[in-house]
Amino acid sequence: MPIIRVALNVHVDTLFDYQAVDAHPQDVGLRVNVPFGKKLLTGIIVAVNSDTRIAVEKLKTAQIIFRDIAPLPTALLDLFQFCSDYYHHPLGMVIMNGLPGKLRGNKPVKLSAPSNDHQFHLTTTGKQVGLTSIPARQRIARRLLTELNQSDGLTSEAAKLISPTAIKLLKAWVELGWVSAMAIPATSTLKPSNKPALTQEQEKAVNAITSEINQFNTWLLHGITGSGKTEVYLHIIEQALALDKQTLVLIPEINLTPQLEAIFRARFPATHLVSLHSGLNDTQRLLGWLQAQQGIARIILGTRLAVFTPLPNLGLVIVDEEQDGSFKQQDGLRYSARDLAIFRARQANIPVVLGTATPSLESYYNALNGRYRSLRLQSRAVENAALPLIQCIDIRTHKTQEGLSEPLTQALVRCLAKKHQSLIFINRRGYAPVLLCKSCAWSATCQRCSSRLVVHLRDKKLCCHHCGHQENFPRACPQCGNQDIAPFGQGTQRIEDTLAARFPEARILRIDRDSIRRKNAWQNILQTIHAQEVDILVGTQLLAKGHDFPNLSLVGILNSDVSLYSTDFRASERLFAQLMQVAGRAGRAAVAGYVLIQTEFPDHPLYRALQQHDYDALAKSLLAERKTAGFPPYVYQALLRAEAHNIELVLDFLAQAAKLAQPLPTVEIFDPVPAPMLRLKGLERAHLLVQSSSRRQLQEFLAQWYKQINSLPTHKIRWVIDVDPLEF
Ligand code: ADP
Ligand code: ZN
Ligand code: ZN
């Protein structure tokens, strides 16, 4: 009796064996429904064996193997396995996290009844139906089956050519589970949109990538905002399409999909494109996923999760805005879609292109040391579109009223008079208060790890959230003696009200998480902006990304200083990327753009680099700091994160885990520390940092440690290993 090994979506790091009478070796990758405890669960068959480590008579029997869709391809199973090994997460949970919701349930999937414009494929069951089982006189049925066996998908059109009755037969076979039918997405008969002549820089980039389109390379396409990275994507996708290959395009924000989708559809009207993001319902998601799996979809555009799409014919991967933090999942399986995208490209031996105006320091470092290949676009693609002029407003001399300084107010007045649009950008990234001396800019830092200390007002302590070090408040600034040192940071409320009171005639639009929650809200907002029905936009990071607003000329930036003195060592890198991005919204077309930053630190190196549009200067100084402090990319990190109802339990668990650890020479293990945001959703959280200069040794250590932590009693604790953490 065949024995199947099944990956199930349960919190145990093991695979489960079942007996299955009807299992064949080629069933690896199929879904199977099995009894588990008192429940039935659906998992994935990862092996079909003839023996097991458990006494056969103790094995339960699988309920049913689903043969409704083709098995997950080996390459995808390998990706899941890698993801499970690298992030130290149970394989079953990894797989189920990556599959569309409809494939996780206990029922086979039912696809809509076929009509015209479908493509038909044999299911696994269908492939086992021999020609001999069809009587010789049923000539049409035999021909149809032969055709299905020989082609990788038969369209309704092609079936009708065999016989007008073929469609009826196919419908019956769908009922029998022999055949699956996929709606072919409607393609447009429109002519492709015009291709602009490439700039020299774009052409160089396109040629570099396409001349090595058949091999693995990680290309860092580092181009300033407005340099026309999208046009580069379009050209290399065209090349992949010409080779009959699929392209996977990952983007950070669901809000950006409609815009990019429209651009791609206009350029490639005859190409099947699917977009996969969290805004789809389960059926839409499944359909897109299946079209990708069957090779019908040629361009797959999606957010983070789309990296787990089966792509039998993958030829190119693009990750737009590669530095964006939303490529990293922040709960459950904490994977980086960017890093997995690189894995997929290596696996398929094809190029992956990481596009960005401000590379993550990890990617920049990899380009410097030659692991990635760098392509630069240094000028804007549209003729006469200059980079915006960036200036600081020193709010120590230009006092603000309700958050607005006089120079910024005047600039808004001028902008309104010219009927140009303006954008007030409020930096609201969660930050912890730090202790700062306003007369000499000294701030309290940790001796052991040179990160900033966090003010805990209640117990009058300064704490390092990186290593656990604690100290008392100093009475005065240790650098200049000033006694007036205070926690730093200010509120951001009521800016919209202030603007409304100051400019009663202006049409003001506020854009934040709340205002875009409704369906289509985002599209309506973009329409309003493009129709010039708004004068002043007020918004947070949501507005910063990727959008093209041709009439926007002024950007005002408030509250960015809080990120200069954040406790998070990545805060400067993120602030710079964000300000570059938001500044890039100004002056994209014929309108000149300028950016005003309200700050108490106009001479800060970050603002100076920003004013000069000099990413490299800032990146190099940040890299030097990271090297001295021993932070990524010079070390590799992982966090053991844990949470429970009470912090004592959590810290106790982490201490036990630390005791089990058997460090390798390069691996450093720090003390457990409470999370900067201690309580979240009713649970208290803490973590423990481990790091190493060697990724391999860190992985070796984690694999061993993970097994040991699994042996701890943990019923009241939830824990997870976060490899390459972005947030602490
Ligand atoms: P990025 O993504 O690099 O910020 P975009 O791809 O959005 O830049 O391009 C900015 C603008 O430049 C767009 O309006 C685009 O249509 C235009 N553009 C891109 N390439 C060219 C080109 N070769 N000639 C003329 N316009 C171009
Ligand atoms: Zn001082
Ligand atoms: Zn410290």
Image (cartoon, grey):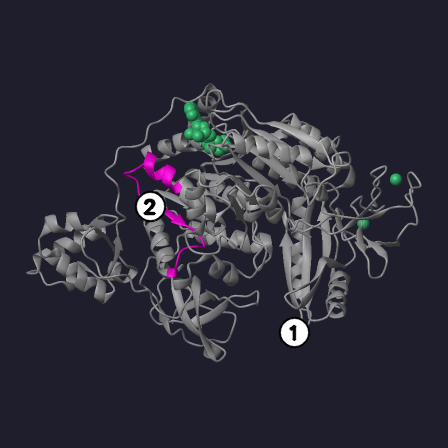
Instruction: Give the numbered dot on residue 3.
Output: none
Alpha carbon distance from label 2 to label 1: 44 Å
Residue 179 drawn at (x, y percent): 24, 59
Residue 684 lies in quadrant: bottom right
Residue 305 drawn at (x, y percent): 48, 52
Q: Find out if the beta carbon at label 1 lies less than 8 Å from the nearest ligand 3 atom.
A: no
Local SS, label 2: loop
Q: Amino acid at mark 1?
A: His
Residue 72 lies in quadrant: bottom left
Residue 542 drawn at (x, y percent): 54, 46
Q: Identify which residue is drawn at 19% across, 62% down.
A: 173
Q: Which residue is mark 1?
A: 715
Tell me the quarter of the image containing the N terminus.
bottom left
Quadrant for ligand 1? top left
Residue 221 seen anywhere in this rendered image of the structure: no
Q: Amino acid at mark 2?
A: Ala
Q: Crowdedness of circle 2 by 10 Å Cα count: few (<14), some, many (20+)?
A: many
Instruction: Give the numbered dot on residue 297.
Output: 2
Return the residue nearer the eye: 232 or 549: 549
Q: Identify which residue is drawn at 48% across, 79% down.
A: 58
Return the residue nearer the eye: 552 or 59: 552
